[in-house]
Amino acid sequence: MKALGIMSGTSLDGITIALIEADPNAENLNILHYKTYPYSDEVKNRIKEVSEHGVVDEVSNLNYELGVIFSHAVSRFLTDFGIDFNEIFVIGLHGQTIYHNSGISTLQIGEPSFIAIRNHIDVVSNFRSKDIVLGGTGAPLIPYFDFLYFRKFSPVALVNLGGISNITFVPDNDPSHVIAFDMGPCNMVLDKSAQVLFGVDFDKDGAFAMQGKINDEMLDYLKNNEYILKKPPKSAGRSEFGDKFFGDILEKFGKINKFDFIATLNMFVAYSIAYSIKNFINSRFNLLVLSGGGAKNKTLVENIKRLLNDFEVKHSDNFGIPSEAKEAVAFGVYAIRSKLKLKSHLPQTTGSKSDYIMGSLTYGE
Ligand SMILES: Nc1ncnc2c1ncn2[C@@H]1O[C@H](COP(=O)(O)OP(=O)(O)OP(=O)(O)O)[C@@H](O)[C@H]1O
Ligand SMILES: CC(=O)N[C@H]1[C@@H]2OC[C@@H](O2)[C@@H](O)[C@@H]1O[C@H](C)C(=O)O
């Protein structure tokens, strides 16, 4: 079965689309094409603004505008790779998270009806709501895919370096043994410091961070962050690590050299990952598989390797999943499962009462 998975994550870099061919258990999974369509600066700023201070008319309008933008991205993707929409069984659309209050409410916007009507394909969206209704945190959801695909390499931990860093530990073939949670901030804060201090979108390859020295006082301050120390299950977003979090650090440590500032933040991201693994996963294993845009940040990867020097650190590309596309691929697999009325979830990873058929279906006709 062929499906499209569409992910637009918390980094706000854009819309990643993947065309996959898979069976519902992802035992045979081929990633045929994938591409990221960047958000314009205007759209990016609107999403940020609405996420932090939006009122209802702005949220509603942006929901429809993003629906159009997603639908155009799908049309471009089909054209770019010469794909006929009749080949596609279903689309999994994550949507853009603009609000996430762990366990209370979560909102992913980008009206799916645009894709369904304009591209004539059934769309599964609204993946997180049932988890909240069943008493879960609403995130992370990728662990079920991680289990399906990576169990053959277990014991292994999958570390996604997106806007937020999150981990799935797959110890063996038993889904009830999987541990997963959001570890802390990642590109969300690294991008913000690249933008504020250096005037660029992100710290390409970690080049700025590479040139700085660690400021011990700032690192000690960050290490005491309440979220990092909190036991899982837990999930995070802009409420925990958005502009307010960054503004507070800047206010306290903005006077230090800007290369040292970003170097220390970069080390803190690595530290929060190492801390989470050492404190919240009580098992022996030595394989870490990185994915997400942050896997291209060489300084971050070096810092992770330094702090976890007894681990073998690889990229998901080495296991057949391009690191940029992993989440999009996962939502493609989830869409296939949902359309077939198959449940997809690991309740212990979010604290929900049970597993469930993910999402809502919008028919493409
Ligand atoms: N060459 C690179 N060097 C450093 N960082 C990079 C590079 N390429 C991409 N990135 C980072 O990756 C980010 C995008 O990552 P990704 O697409 O995994 O995030 P996301 O899906 O939005 O996040 P999340 O998984 O939290 O929802 C960019 O914002 C940038 O910070
Ligand atoms: C609410 C929300 O959108 N959360 C995202 C975010 O980005 C990373 C991390 O925080 C994770 O919890 C989640 O995304 C992935 C796709 C997940 O659900 O596993």
Image: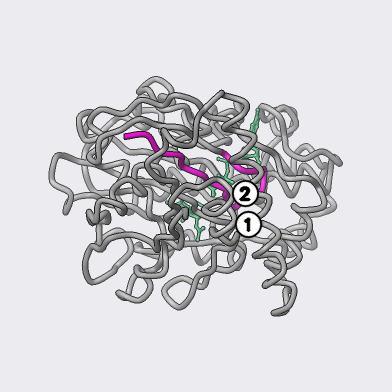
Does the rendering let one see residue 313?
no
Contact between marks 1 and 2 (CB within 8 A): the answer is yes
Residue drawn at (72%, 27%), measured in percent from left and top?
A: 207
Q: Position of residue 40 (x, y in %)?
A: 78, 45
Ligand 1, seen in the image, is in the quarter at top right
**Residue at the spot of label 2:** 70
Q: Which stretch did the figure color magenta? A: 1-16
Residue drawn at (42%, 55%), measured in percent from left and top?
A: 124
**CA–CA distance in space, label 1 to label 2:** 5 Å
Q: Nearer the viewer, residue 213 or 97?
A: 97
Q: Position of residue 73 (x, y in %)?
A: 64, 41
Q: Amino acid at mark 2?
A: Phe
**Residue at the spot of label 1:** 67
Magenta stretch: includes residue 92: no
Q: Nearer the viewer, residue 141 or 351?
A: 141
Residue closest to the far left: 174
